[in-house]
Amino acid sequence: MPPKTGPLSLPSGLRAGVSKLNGAALDGDFDSARLCLAHLRELSTGRGLESLAAALAGLSAVLGAPGRQPSAGLGYALVEVTDALERLGQV
């Protein structure tokens, strides 16, 4: 029988970073959102965070390059990131 493990310990600042990312994107400050996203992608490299890392990669594709408008699907991608974070908090 495998040993029981406790809840996943999320990196410090992850929840606040997602909140800041969502706020910047919803305010139309896409370059600030990209900066938050880059920081979150660094934080989400640990074991057990693969689903969040995948959602962040999807959001990165939607946001695109600095100085440009995001492509279609921004709202969906933001929800995917938030949902992935929430699922991790329930593990």
Image: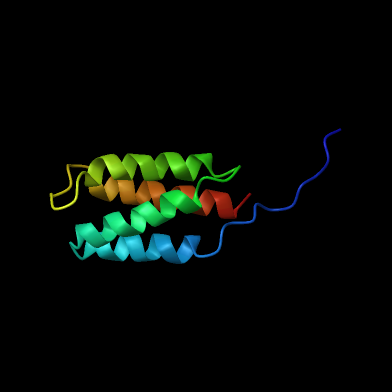
Q: How is the image coloured?
A: rainbow
Please give left or right for residue 34 compared with residue 9 in the image. Answer: left
Residue 19, position as x, y percentages in the image: 39, 64
Could you say which quadrant of the image residue 58 lies in? top left
Residue at screen point 49% across, 53% down: 43
Residue 85, position as x, y percentages in the image: 49, 52
Please give left or right for residue 75 compared with residue 37 in the image. Answer: left
Q: Is residue 14 above or below residue 68?
A: below
Residue 55, position as x, y percentages in the image: 40, 42
- In front of the other: 16 or 78: 16
Please give left or right for residue 47 compared with residue 31 in the image. Answer: right
Residue 52, position as x, y percentages in the image: 47, 45
Residue at screen point 54% across, 45% down: 49
- In front of the other: 52 or 38: 38
Please give left or right for residue 57 compared with residue 91 in the image. Answer: left
Q: Residue furthest right?
A: 1
Number of marks drawn: 0
